[in-house]
Amino acid sequence: MSTVGKVIKCKAAVLWEIKKPFSIEEVEVAPPKANEVRIKMVATGVCRSDDHVISGSLVTPLPAILGHEAAGIVESIGEGVTTVKPGDKVIPLFTPQCRNCNVCKHPEGNFCLKSDLNFSRGTLQDGTTRFTCRGKPIHHFLGTSTFSQYTVVDEISVAKIDAASPLEKVCLIGCGFTTGYGSAVKVGKVTPGSTCAVFGLGGVGLSVIIGCKAAGAARIIGVDINKGKFEKAKELGATECISPQDFKKPIEEVLQEMSGGGVDFSFEVIGRLDTMMAALSCCQGAYGVSVIVGVPPDSQNLSLNPMLLLGGRTWKGAVFGGFKSRDSVPKLVADFMAKKFPLDPLITHVLPFEKINEAFDLLRSGKSIRTVLTF
Ligand code: COD
Ligand code: ZN
């Protein structure tokens, strides 16, 4: 029996309040309105930013259905939708691309003004929600809400991908992989033969390493206090790995010495102010580029000696690896299908969707790089 135009009853993980586990509930998912798309979820990754909502350090209206790194199949479309159709494989996009705002129209900008990260309304673009549970409206999260068997997204927040792509792998292109990879190839614009330093070897840091390697870097130095992370980093392209705890002098001095005066590109993929300063300082003073990927807790501030920049260094940051989402995600999936980069080494656990709380325990304990939940 067709579900088109009807409310779908299905299972979703609802977060009722912060610092509590998800509860798997029966929810009602309304049909898509004009310019909206209803998606049957196939796989979703579990990302640190979802956990930041649970801990309270990323604020979004609750109760909500979280999740923003996923892949699925279009079930039905609302009036006026032209870029996807029922049956298409798609990736929901937590950074939309409206193609009309100043950012979308700028050749370099990707942080679309329609992003819910800007306002955190917890709704679709029309200001309402499509989810109901126990008679109460449930908020969306970043316009994606992938911790549900079905979700509704705006057309500006979804990209059609290759029909042959394995959804339980390419879901990582929806956030973690792309954030790291793009930070190297698109934001830092790593050049062939260069020397790079990557601070933090979690899933996103490893994706930065994959990007540095793809861009042809000659040396990629991984930096982490957990030496257990070194093996995989080397497998993915790090040429050396060091722990700041093995040195008496500051790590930026160690890296300057290792690189004969400063690395060409550095990346902070931890989310700490001290490592952001170390990453900035370790890059070459006249032409080095340092990219911030991590987000520090509770909007902390840095103070800076402007001399660090006056010599010619560049300091930058971006969301979603600087990629315009609807333009780039289909290309990234095509690149994965063409074996231009791997995703398998990033996926350490695969669990059924119902075990979502277990997946977050794995994330918090540091035992997983990425857990993919399958529906
Ligand atoms: N020095 C060196 N390494 C350290 C230090 C330190 N002082 N402290 C921790 N580390 C290492 C840890 O041992 C770990 O290996 C690594 O740093 C961090 O890895 P993870 O697994 O905790 O994190 P990732 O790779 O999954 O994600 C890291 C981010 C910084 C990207 C993430 O936490 C974040 O801030 N995300 C928000 C960025 C974003 O764009 N969000 C948009 C939607 S997701
Ligand atoms: Zn994420």
Image (cartoon, rainbow, N blue to C red):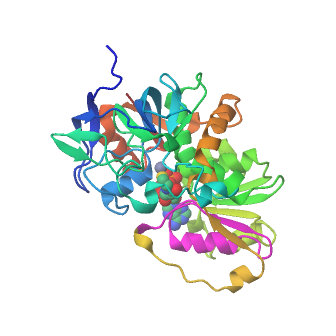
Residue 244 colored in magenta in the image? no
Task: Tell me where residue 345 appears, x and y as whole percent.
Answer: 57, 37
- Judged from this view, the residue extending furthest toward the right is 193
> Which quadrant of the rendered structure holds the C terminus?
top left
- The residue located at (71%, 79%) in the rendering is 309
- The residue located at (31%, 40%) in the rendering is 130
Query: In terms of image quadrants, where is residue 42?
Result: top left
Task: Tell me where residue 138 appears, x and y as whole percent.
Answer: 26, 46
- The residue located at (38%, 31%) in the rendering is 351
- In the rendered image, the vertical position of residue 267 relative to residue 204, given as above or below: below
- Judged from this view, the residue extending furthest toward the left is 134
Q: Give the range drawn in magenta.
A: 269-297
User: Would you say 345 lies left or right of 314 here?
Assistant: left
- The residue located at (38%, 47%) in the rendering is 124
Task: Tell me where residue 319 appears, x and y as whole percent.
Answer: 56, 57
Residue 285 colored in magenta in the image? yes
User: Would you say 139 lies left or right of 302 here?
Assistant: left
Residue 352 visible, this angle: yes
Residue 225 visible, this angle: no
> Which quadrant of the rendered structure holds the N terminus?
top left
Relative to the observer, which residue lies in front, 243 or 69?
69
Query: In terms of image quadrants, where is residue 357?
Result: top left
- In the rendered image, the vertical position of residue 261 relative to residue 65, given as above or below: below
Relative to the observer, which residue lies in front, 91 or 125?
125
